[in-house]
Amino acid sequence: QSQQSSEEQLKLDFEMMKKQGTWMGRQLGEDMLKLVDEAFVKVDINNDGSITRVEVEDFFSKYAHSNPMDFQSGLASMGGQMLPRREIMLTEDFMNTLDEDESDDITINEWREYWSKFVLAGKPEVEVKAQLAQFLSSGAFA
């Protein structure tokens, strides 16, 4: 009976953690952490250890021409250059989401924390890896 109550307690604890989005002691696996760090380097164009707003703009601008809707929505000025409105919205959303200390740059720790939130919320690393790969290949950000 004590084994059964222990199993029931584990199930209850697990369900509670899923609901709260917390996984006690859970961290990114080594492979996942390596992929997250490699992605950081791809966005950190000048390799200075932080991702600036300009680097985010440059990253998203790689994908602007692949979507004709970008140009139908018009152009707007940001940072002294004309960018599709969708690209500006993506840059703003990206910075607001990842730049937790509002320093106008994203550190490796902020970057890791963003991607680890998906894993800590219970999403399988395989799915997070696919989401990260899609971000790098198409600029898809959610």
Image (cartoon, rainbow, N blue to C red):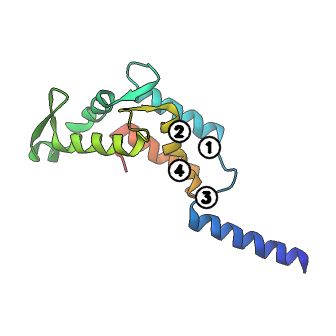
Q: Is residue 27 left or right of residue 46?
A: right
Mark closest to the chain's N terminus, 3 or 2: 3
As drawn, 135 above or below 78: below
- Percent x, y of residue 97: 39, 46
Mark 2, residue position? 112
Name the image quarter holding residue 100: top left
Name the image quarter holding residue 133: top left
Foreground: disc 1 or disc 3: 3
Taking the spot 51% from the left edge, 49% from the top edge, the residue there is 128
Q: Please say if the residues under marks 1 and 2 sit with CB atoms less than 8 Å apart.
A: yes
Callout 2 secondary element: helix
Counting every numbered tag in the picture gives: 4
Q: CA distance from mark 3 to mark 2?
A: 16 Å
Mark 1, residue position? 28
Residue lying at the far bottom of the rendered structure: 1
Q: Amino acid at mark 3?
A: Thr
Q: Quadrant of the N terminus?
A: bottom right
Mark closest to the chain's N terminus, 1 or 2: 1
Mark 4, residue position? 117
- Percent x, y of residue 113: 53, 42
Mark 3, residue position? 22
